[in-house]
Amino acid sequence: MALGLYIHVPFCSSRCDYCAFATWDDRFEFVDQYLEYVIREIRLRSRGMRFHTVFFGGGTPTILRIDALAAIMDSIELVPDAEVSIEANPESLSSDVRAYEQVGINRVSLGVQSLRQNELGLLGRRHQVHDATRAIASLANSNLRYSCDFIFGVRGGSPDLLLEDVAGLLKIQRPPEHLSIYGLTVEAGTPLALQQERHPDDDDDYLTYLKIDASLKELGFEAYEISNFCSGNSYSRHNWNYWMQGEYLGVGPSAHSYLNGQRSWNIRDSFRWGRAVETGASSIAGFEELSVADKIFEGLTLALRTRIGVPLNVLNVDELPDDLYDLTLDHRIVLSAKGRLLESQLAHRLIVQNITADELMEHQSILPFDVGAPVK
């Protein structure tokens, strides 16, 4: 099983109205200390580890200088052909994206969210459409793999215009090989949560998602997870490792880890996390160990969200409408677009006792686009 490394960079130039992540837009004086502390935490907690995937998330990791990213990369041991991704906002992406390649980063996840200026305003995004088009053009002219993120469900936005923009994006020379398209969610404590009139409509989102799935399929992009689509075999290996319950180390404030059957999470506040690392105290705020039954249920629930689905014996398809799923030739249940929208309800129908932990691990070894198991 692959081993991943998640690096949380907790800085943003401003907070979006829907964001509830552990990020700060008023702590830039802490950036140099953060760099020192995150490298120290990596070296302390990753001894003997070689990583198959690395993901710089946040926050806005591209706020960091290239030399800072290089210093972090120098502290990490990688296997050959490792996937190293960085999240980027259009306005903070380096004007010379080749610099990312030079420090060992080979994949960029670009937070476009919308190519309509009015929708960016409705989301509380600070970048302009021209920032996004410039960033996309830079990535298209590089050797970097790249993905673009979009959000639907914005009150006052247009799903048809979103589909038009995505279709246009995929016609450029060397378009993104991966798209993440999320429904807008309302998180407690955010400015969006306080404004009911801006909340998305569930019925509209249902229809929009079905349109998105059908349109992207026509354009050669398959959903390999509820919100993630790719062409060919260009899925996110880092995120796939999460969904298959692979092991990963998380460093930085609020970062989560899953190692040796134990899930843990770091101190959320960046200053308190930094003090813990500086003084040699534990940066871990808490941990939990799942029972075998809980781990199996969680593993099946995660697999149900993805293109590999679940084994036929853990879900009674006789109780389900035919348009919610497909059966594969190797006896798996894979949810249709309609089924994916009901994944959380269907998860409660899983028959956990019908599969062992070893059988689940074997199932999780299937890759999202393995040949020889076509959906019929």
Image: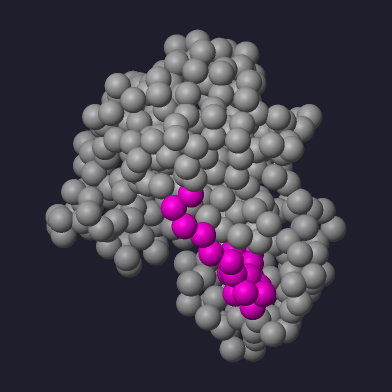
User: Please, what is the dominant secondary structure of the magenta stretch?
Assistant: helix
State which quadrant residue 29 falls in: top left
Question: Residue 305: where, in percent of width, then height?
Answer: 57, 63
Q: Residue at x 66, y 61 (%)?
A: 261
Magenta-colored span:
284-303
Q: Is residue 81 magenta?
A: no
Question: Residue 352: where, in percent of width, then height?
Answer: 65, 81
Q: Residue at x 69, y 62 (%)?
A: 308
Q: Residue furthest right?
A: 372
Answer yes or no: is residue 228 visible: yes
* Above or below: residue 95 compared with residue 232: above
**Which of the pair 345/32 is nearer the observer?**
32
**Which of the pair 212/100 is nearer the observer?**
100
Q: Residue at x 78, y 29 (%)?
A: 80
Question: Residue 363: where, in percent of width, then height?
Answer: 76, 65
Colouring convention used in this rendered image of the protein: one colour
* Above or below: residue 86 compared with residue 262: above
Q: Residue at x 64, y 78 (%)?
A: 293
Q: Is residue 290 magenta?
A: yes
